[in-house]
Image (cartoon, rainbow, N blue to C red):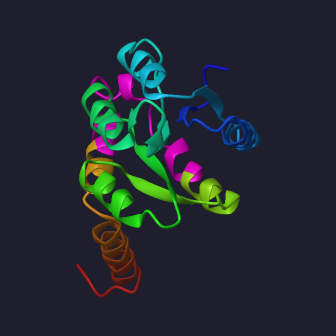
Amino acid sequence: HSGMPRALIIDDEPDLRTLLTLALHRHGWQADAVGDCAGARRVLDDTATPYHLILTDLRLPDGNGLDLVRHARERRPLTPVVVLTAYGDIDTAVQAVKLGAHDFLTKPLRIERLAQLLEGFAQCPPDQDAPVDPAALRAALERNRWNQSRTARELGWTLAKLRYWMQRLGLTQ
C-alpha cells in the first residue's frame, strides 16, 4: 500500500466524504477523511503521515476553510491543497488560491474533473520526501510556482507547450 498516493479529505457532509473516498480508491489512491477543522488540524499537525493531496471544503461547521488552507500551507508546505466550493462561492475559492491553494473544484462535483486533478497529483511525491530528494524538491518548487493562479498556471503550460513544439520543429537552438 505504501506505493499508493494518499489524500486527506476534509468535508462535513458524510455523503460527499464517502463519494470522494470511493472516487480516490477507484483511481488508485488511499484516503483519510475528517469532518471538521479540529480533526483536520490534528491530522495535519501529525506529520508522520505523508499526503500527496489535501482536499478541503471551504465551509466547515467549526471554522473557516480559508484558515485551514493557511494552516495546511504552514504544516505541509509541499502538499497541494484543492478547495471544494459551492457553485456561487467562486470569490472565496479565488481567495483560497491566493492563500496558496493549488486549485478548486466546484460543487456539485464533476468526477472527471477530479480524475484529471488526481492524475496530475499522483506524480508528485508526498510532502515529507521532498526536501531530501532533489528531483522531488524541484517538482515541489515547480508546483508552487504554478500556485500563483489558474490563469498564470494555464499561461505557463501554454508557453511550455509552445517551447516544446518550437524545439520539435527546429525553431529554436
Which is more toward the observer, 47 or 141?
47
Residue 64's spot in the image, x, y percent?
A: 36, 39
User: In this rendering, does residue 147 appear at all?
Assistant: no
Instruction: Report whether 66 appears left or right of 25.
Output: left
Main structural element of the magenta stretch: helix, strand or loop?
A: helix
Q: Quadrant where the N terminus lies?
A: top right
Visible in this render: residue 51? yes
Q: Quadrant of residue 166?
A: bottom left
- Judge whether 24 appears above or below 118 on screen: above
Q: Is residue 119 magenta?
A: yes
Vertical order, 137 against 118 (above or below): above
Question: For residue 47, which quarter of the picture?
Answer: top left
Extreme-front residue of the structure? 61
Q: Residue at x 28, y 57 (%)?
A: 95
Q: In this view, does 50 lie above or below 10?
A: above
Image: 162 above or below 113: below
Question: Which segment is the magenta one?
Answer: 118-140
What residue sits 73% from the left and 36% below the top?
18
The residue closer to the viewer here, 171 or 48, is 48
Where residue 173 appears, as percent x and y from the top left, is 23, 78
- Which one is nearer the viewer's eye here, 111 or 168? 111
